[in-house]
Image (tube, helix red, strand yellow):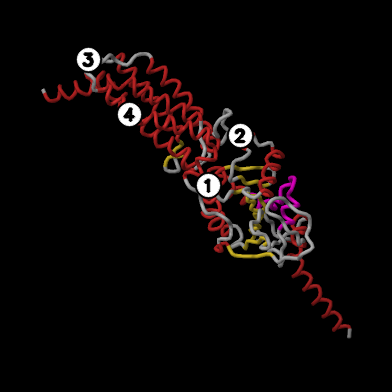
Amino acid sequence: MRRTAVVVLLAALSAAALASPATAQGPAPAVRAVLFFSPTCGHCEYVINELLFPVWFPQFGGEPEVLWDEAIDVPAFYLATNGTLEILLVDVSVTAGLDLHRAVGEALGIPEQRRGSVPRLVVGDLYLIGSGEIPDEFPGIVEESLAGGGIDWPNLPGMDEALAAIPLGEPAPSTTTTAATATAATSTTAVSSTTIAAPATTVTEATTTTSGGGVLPLGGDSMWDRFRRDEVANSLALVVLGLMLLSVVGAAWLARRPGPAPGPGLSVPLLALIGLAVAIYLAFVETSGAEAVCGPVGDCNAVQQSEWAKLFGVIPIGVIGVAGYAVVLAAWAVARLGSGRLVDWSRVALLAGSVAGVVFSVYLTFLEPFVIGATCMWCLGSAVVVTLLMWLTARPGWAAWRRLREARDA
């Protein structure tokens, strides 16, 4: 009997020893964040359909399921979760989602000119805005946070109601439980398409789908939709775009007019210095991630944080502007201080550089109202500067080119 008791005791101790490590580990860490989007936002579609579901969810925990209340024709809230990464997606085109977007923007102290921008991702006490800033920073935040114990839902006004608006028929595959998620898991709240309603008496089952289900209302938007996001600023960009196109024709006509062609005067370096200052500031904003100082018209930060702020996704546009204006200043100095054919080549370089700058500015100015849906006043200022430089260098540059050709043919 004593031997049997010893054996049973040893077996129990062994089982406890084997079980204790797993118990000591506790629940696995999870990262929870809120992503505000608009169905007519191309940048939102890029972040969600190109990065969040096909890349980040598989990278951090595996394929998710998406849950929402199918009793609502146009839900404002969707929960995408795989237990490790949980994202509350908020549609700002629905009044309930827009109300939360505004409340969170005020609570986080987001500057007024950026407060309406989407996509906006809130993780912990941080916020990321745009299809440039979110991809650059969010994966690193998730990786670091998972190693450090995870991040809970942000403590912001309206979060409890938003989470409770998703009635879960089955518990979400989360490995951690918080007060907010517990509320969501047991709630049968219904949400109207305009405001967050009180808990309804009708019990509705949540609809679930995998990431490939395509349940989010993301259909992209047209050029006209993007233009209408800020009609005042985008109309100004359209005016500048038209003037640049007319200037290309006008400068070509001016360059071919007969008569003397004086060399480039002091107006050229003055304009180039103004353009250089603007380019240096934009390069700083694009490379540092700092917020641009914007005026009452336009949304500089939406432009600077877009995927179009870097050429080929690598070179910041502001850096290209710095290099371009530096070349203009150097060419002007040679044209003023040099001699012989070097002067003519410098004048040709001034004309070629300014024309290239105008062509590039035409491309960028088109992108702002019709692709990005926002206009940067700093960028328009640079476009005006480079257009004026083209006018000033058109005649001396073309005359110098003719002299060089005549000397070659002689």
Q: Which residue is mark 1?
A: 43
Q: Residue at x 23, y 14 (%)?
A: 260
Determine the image quadrant of residue 271: top left
Mark 1 and mark 2 lie on one chain; the one further toward the N terminus is: 1
The image quadrant of residue 312 is top left
Marks 1/2: CA–CA distance: 18 Å
Q: Can you give x and y, in whole percent of width and height, for residue 313 in the image? A: 45, 43
Q: Which residue matches tag 3?
A: 259
Residue 139 in the figure: left or right of residue 380: right
Let me know if residue 114 is in the magenta part. Answer: no
Mark 1 or 3, closer to the camera: 3
Check residue 159 for magenta coloring: yes
Q: Earlier in the sequence, mark 3 or mark 2?
A: 2
Q: Residue at x 42, y 28 (%)?
A: 383
Q: Quadrant of residue 171?
A: bottom right
Local secondary structure at mark 4? helix
Name the kind of residue labelled 3 in the image.
Gly
Give above or below for 309 relative to 191.
above
Report the residue marked by disc 2. Answer: 113
Disc 3 to disc 2, how far (Cα)?
Answer: 50 Å
Mark closest to the chain's N terminus, 4 or 2: 2
10 Å crowding of disc 3: few (<14), some (14-19), many (20+)? few
Q: Position of residue 65 (x, y in %)?
A: 62, 63
Question: Which type of secondary structure does the marked residue at label 3 adopt?
Answer: loop
Q: Is residue 148 above or below residue 400?
A: below
Sequence-wise first label, 4 or 1: 1
- Check disc 4 and report the residue beneath it: 248
Work out how far the residue at label 4 is from the one at label 1, CA to CA, in angstroms: 32 Å
Q: Residue at x 55, y 61 (%)?
A: 214
Q: Type of residue at label 2?
A: Gln
